[in-house]
Each structure stands twice: as C-alpha cells, then as structure tokens.
Image: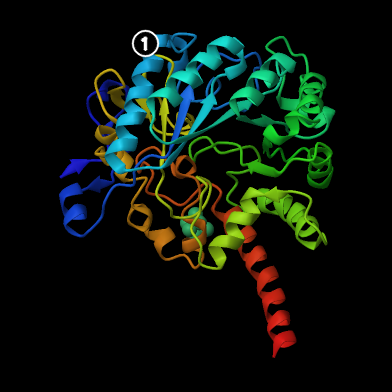
Amino acid sequence: MLDGHDTRRAGRRTLSEWPLTLDLAALAEGGWRPTPFRQFVLKIHSRCDLACTYCYMYEMADQSWRSRPLRMASDVVEAVAARIAEHVRGHGLTSVEVILHGGEPLLVAPEEIGRLVGTVRAAVDAQVGVTVQTNALRLDRTYLGLFDRLDIGVGVSLDGGQQDHDRSRRTADGRGSHHKVAAGLRLLTEPPFDRLFRGLLCTVDLRNDPLETYQALLAFGPPTIDFLLPHGTWSQPPPGLGRDDGAAPYADWLIEIFDRWYAAPARPAGVRLFDEIIYLLVGGRSASEQIGLSPTAMVVVETDGEIEQSDILKSTYAGAPSTGLHVFRDSFDDVLRLPSIAARQIGWEALSATCRACRVSQVCGGGHYAHRYRPGSGFLNPSVYCADLLRLITHVARTIRRDITALRKDIR
Ligand code: SF4
C-alpha cells in the first residue's frame, strides 16, 4: 500500500495532508491501466512580464519558481524530446500535443522557440501539435511569422474589456496591459495569421459584468472561449466564496453568459465549459481538467527539467505539483506509476463520499482537483466551488432537457 504522496521530497509537504491511499497493485488486478500522457506542457520560461493578482504561479502557496532557471536549456529540451519520443513509442501513440507555457513563453526569443519545436518534432515519430499560451504582450509579426511557418497555434489570455482586463492583469509597476494584448490580438486575427488562433482564456472576476465580458471577448472572434474559475481551496477560498451561505456567485455569473450563448441562433464561439457540460450530460467524456471524471493525460516539465503534475496545484500548498522526477533520470512511464498521478486517473475512485453521493457527480467529477484541497483531508473533499458547480450543471441540464423534450414532441 502506497501513500498518495511521492515521499522523496517529503520535506516540502506533510503526509497528513494526503489521506488518500492507493493500492496500485489491487487497481491493476481489477483491470485498471494508467492512461498515457498525450499533452506535454513545457515551461520554457519561468518568469512573466505581468504580475496578475490571481496568478497561481507567483501569488499562491507554491513559490518554487524562485529557484528555477529562467529558460529551458538546450540539454533539457533534448532530454524532454527524447522522453516524449520514448513515451510515444512505448504506447503506440500517433499524435501528441505540446503546449509552450511559462511564466510567459514569449520571453523566449523566436529563434530559440523555433529550435525547441524543431528538436521535439525531429525526435518524435508521431504528429506533434504545438500551441503557445501567451499573455500576447510581445505577440508581433516576428513571432507570428515563426508560428505560421511551424504551424504553432496561439491561445491568448484576456479577461474582458480594457477596464475589466486591467483590473487584474497589470505589470509589476501597476500599468494595465489591455492595449498591448488588443494590438497582438488584432495581428493574430487578421490573415494570414488568423488560422493560428486557438482561442481566449478568461479568468472569471465577479466584479466584471458577465455579458460585457462575453461581448468584449467575442469582439476578437475567438474560435473558443475558456472561462476559468479563479484558483482557490477550502483554506484559501476564491474571492466571493467561503461564507457558507448557500450563495453560488460564480454559477450566477456564468449562467448569464450561458443563457445568451445558448439562445444565439448561430453560436459565435465555442465556450469550453458549457460545451463540456452538455457533452457530459449526454454521456460523453470530458477533455478538460475543470469538470468530469476523465483521467488526466497531461504532464508538465519545468525549465530545469523537473517533471510535475498540473501546475494549478501550486495554488494548494508548497510542493504540491512535484513528482520528484526529472527528464534526465526518469521516463514519463515512471511518472505514470506514481500514486499521486494515479489519483488523477481513477476518476470516481478518487472522489470524496459527498461527491460520490451527489446527483451531478458524473458530470461535475468533483470539479478541478486543486479546488478540492483542504489542509488535513487533502483532496478528498468536494470542490470549494461545489454550490456553483451544482447550480450551473443543474441549469444547463434543465435547459437542454427542455429542448430535447420539445424536439421529441416535434418528431413524434
Ligand atoms: S457538485 Fe459538489 S458534491 Fe457534487 S460532485 Fe461536484 S463538488 Fe462534488
């Protein structure tokens, strides 16, 4: 029997914070098999040119960025490429996805990004889709020309109109960033670069009007919008939560957008959270960490080559995403054998008793893993967003049930 923690770096954490115990041998005997990684998040730069107030990397519990090198060095890039290639061969994968992340990945020079992507693609005998997730401050024709040549998709973080975006997404000396982001987005959304645009990532801020936010995002014509709930835990609740008064302000905020989005005759953009909920309600599997019970197939490599779990776990406690493994020494299969990774892949088995008894658990899946954290009981809790998830899912379910009932009557 193994504890859910890898204990090699136990100095940065306490076992009492992780009560979930997993018997991997018993799971394997029962037919469970680890899901190979298909998404590799490469932290190619560990710093950022913004100082967003809600940032999980710099402003929350884990401060490991302070000891990381600024950039991913070439020997680390070669080792990552070789490890991805090994994983692809071992599992017979035909395609994988590499996400260039940071900090801010565009703090790395274009030619260096070109070399990095070339190294990975040359090593891996499978289709390697590459996306960069950027704050767009430095997104210019030089970067876009490179992305166009190498077929690198671009996702941009934008929180709404100028005032709403600049509320949180500011430079360290307090200047807003919207004007630069908008300039980058205007270049990205014009031919020939528009084919590279993958979508907008928007962190929900209850102080911003939901419909104004939605319209400000739509103004850039994104193919998809990903609304993210600000990260928080039971010990550090997100803004507006933690009063135990039954309020669900994030659901109310999102429902205003859902109703507008759903009622539109031709939906102008996919909204990932809503699409995922609808898909799960009709029996599909989720492809998002935010919701559902699908096994996580994503792994992170830091600038120094350390292999980590989803870095959103940095919002829980110091060292939470750490695996203790490194691309110089360890394979991605070694990562798959860690109980802490298995806990992210066994879905229902890793839910708290409250979630297991919940009527929307097959859709909700306990929400984002990081949002379940409570000191003392670890991740074996409902989400800190429980009331919001329940209200949002119930609203979406009632809306589509109404339409399906009407449709059934029509086709009788
Ligand atoms: S709504 Fe709450 S209790 Fe139900 S599965 Fe989600 S987090 Fe768990």
- Badge 1 residue CB within 8 Å of ligand 1: no
Q: Is residue 142 rendered to the left or right of residue 358?
A: right
The percent coordinates of residue 390 (x first, y second) are: 58, 60
The percent coordinates of residue 184 (x first, y second) are: 77, 22
Answer with the quarter of the image where residue 338 lies.
top left
Compared to residue 128, the image places residue 329 above or below, namely above
Taking the image as drawn, is residue 156 in sight? yes
Q: Is residue 127 rendered to the left or right of residue 53?
A: left
Where disc 1 sits, the SS reads helix
The percent coordinates of residue 182 (x first, y second) are: 81, 25
Near-viewer residue (49 or 13): 49
| Residue at the image position 32 percent from the left and 56 percent from the top | 349
User: Neighbour class for label 1 at 10 Å: few (<14), some, many (≥20)?
Assistant: few
Q: Is residue 381 rendered to the left or right of residue 225?
A: left
| Numbered circles on residues, count | 1
Quarter of the image with the C terminus in it = bottom right
Quarter of the image with the N terminus in it = top left
The residue that mark 1 highlights is: 75
Near-viewer residue (344 or 73): 73
| Residue at the image position 42 percent from the left and 29 percent from the top | 300
Compared to residue 162, the image places residue 380 above or below, namely below
